[in-house]
Image (cartoon, grey):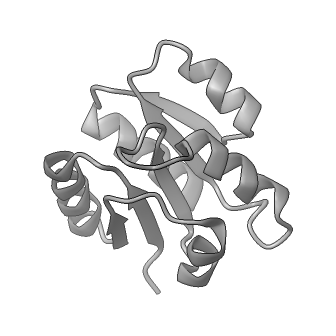
Amino acid sequence: MKKRVLIIEDDHDLLELLRIVFRDSGYDVIFSPNLLDTDYINLLHPDLVLLDVRIAGSSKSGADICKELKTHPETEKLPVILCSGEHNLPELARKSHADMYLTKPYDLAAILSQVNKYLS
């Protein structure tokens, strides 16, 4: 059974690029340009979430959603990788209990390597 990666990213070009990279690497990919609430994320049963910190038009940040995921018993062990160009990304990741963070602009090989590490 393929591992499922949920990508939440509001940059449509980047979202499509990530979708192709992960699909071509054998993952089942679910993607959303909008921030999803934790209940809906739980219903999708992803094996890992790649989560942008800033989603246009959302009242919450990706860090807020990550923190919510990490406080729910059903999703507390779900690996979450926060992604952003924010200067304080390490602090945001620590405070939201993200498993790791990746700085934009992305190195696609590094992203794939980190996802493979969490899903192997």
Do we see residue 120 in this rendering? no
What count of labels does the image hold?
0
Spot the residue most to the top.
Answer: 87
Residue lying at 74% horizontally and 39% vertically, measured from the top left: 97
Foreground of the two, 65 or 25: 65
Q: Position of residue 111 (x, y in %)?
A: 38, 41
Q: Is the C terminus in the top left, top right, bottom left or bottom right quadrant?
A: bottom right
Whether residue 72 sits left or right of residue 54 in the image: it is right
Whether residue 67 sits left or right of residue 79 in the image: it is right
Residue lying at 61% horizontally and 20% vertically, measured from the top left: 90
Q: Quadrant of residue 6?
A: bottom left
Q: Position of residue 22 (x, y in %)?
A: 29, 61
Q: Is residue 114 above or below residue 74?
A: above
Q: Position of residue 43 (x, y in %)?
A: 60, 83
Residue lying at 29% horizontally and 31% vertically, measured from the top left: 106
Spot the residue most to the left.
Answer: 13
Q: Is residue 104 above or below residue 20?
A: above
Whether residue 13 sits left or right of residue 6 in the image: it is left
Do we see residue 52 in this rendering? yes
Whether residue 120 sits left or right of residue 110 in the image: it is right
Q: Is residue 51 above or below residue 107?
A: below
Q: Position of residue 113 (x, y in %)?
A: 41, 43
Residue lying at 27% horizontally and 26% vertically, measured from the top left: 105
